[in-house]
């Protein structure tokens, strides 16, 4: 087989696989789950840089049926955004550092191995209150 024929055949196969994959997701609303895509090990080079640190999605709304899992790393003295509220409840879990947690007009300081719950439609926020990076998980339901 000629090299150009091999390349054209490979491109056609890849195109058909991509089209089939997109059609399957349209029909089912979800990708096919495998052991390879269900295990997600943190890799800094795959994290998204933000203006206050970075974020890493372990599971986003395009992958899960309804829950998302993200790790946020925030530089000292900064927060990802101002206190806010939304319909989805949210759960933070502090991995490293010191967080200032705001909920419905009150503030507390929390360290590692602490969970922080944000009920639906209640104003909340989290900021780094320490002098090292704040690393925490965010678990949230995706209300499509």
Image: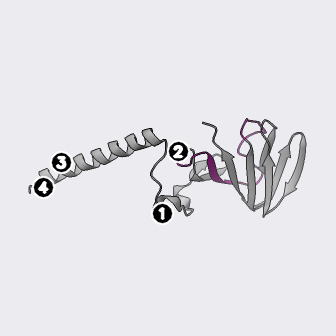
The tag earlier along the polypeptide, 4 or 2, is 4
Query: How far apart are the two marked residues, 3 and 4, measured between alpha carbons?
Result: 9 Å
Judge the density around disc 4: few (<14), some (14-19), many (≥20) Cα neighbours within 10 Å. Answer: few
Percent across and percent down for residue 26 are 43, 38
**Label 3 to label 1: alpha-carbon separation:** 31 Å
Q: CA distance from mark 2 to mark 3?
A: 31 Å
Q: State whether residue 80 appears in this view.
A: yes
List the residue tagged with mark 2. Answer: 62
Element type where label 1 sits in the image = helix
Q: Residue at x 43, y 39 (%)?
A: 27
**Of circles 2 and 1, which is in front?**
1
Instruction: Residue at 82% x, 38% y: name it.
Output: 122
In the displayed structure, does residue 126 sit left or right of residue 34? right
Magenta span: 62-88
Q: Nearer the viewer, mark 4 or mark 2?
A: 2
- Whichever of labels 3 and 1 marks the residue nearer the N terminus, that label is 3
Q: Residue furthest left?
A: 1
Any magenta on residue 71? Answer: yes
Magenta span main SS: loop
Q: Is residue 124 left or right of residue 34?
A: right
Which quadrant of the rendered structure holds the N terminus? bottom left
Residue 51 vertical placement versus 85 (above, below): below
**Helix, strand or loop at mark 4:** helix
Q: Which residue is mark 4?
A: 3
Please tell me which residue lies in front, 49 or 7: 7
Along the line of sight, the residue nearer the viewer: 96 or 70? 70
What residue sits right under mark 1 in the picture? 35
Determine which residue is flagged by label 3.
8
- Considering the numbered disc 2 on the image, is that residue within a helix, a strand or a loop? loop
Q: Position of residue 74 (x, y in %)?
A: 70, 53
């Amino acid at each position: 087989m000629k090299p150009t024929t091999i390349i054209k055949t490979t491109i056609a196969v890849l195109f058909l696989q991509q089209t089939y994959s997109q059609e399957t997701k349209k029909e089912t609303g979800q990708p096919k789950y495998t052991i390879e895509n269900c295990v997600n090990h943190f890799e800094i080079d795959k994290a998204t840089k933000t203006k206050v640190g970075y974020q890493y999605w372990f599971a986003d709304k395009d992958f899960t049926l309804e829950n998302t899992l993200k790790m946020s790393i925030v530089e000292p003295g900064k927060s990802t955004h101002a206190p806010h509220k939304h319909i989805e409840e949210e759960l933070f879990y502090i991995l490293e550092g010191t967080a200032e947690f705001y909920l419905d007009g009150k503030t507390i300081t929390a360290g590692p191995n602490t969970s922080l719950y944000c009920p639906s439609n209640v104003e909340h926020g989290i900021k780094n209150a320490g002098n090292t990076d704040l690393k925490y998980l965010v678990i949230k339901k995706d209300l499509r």
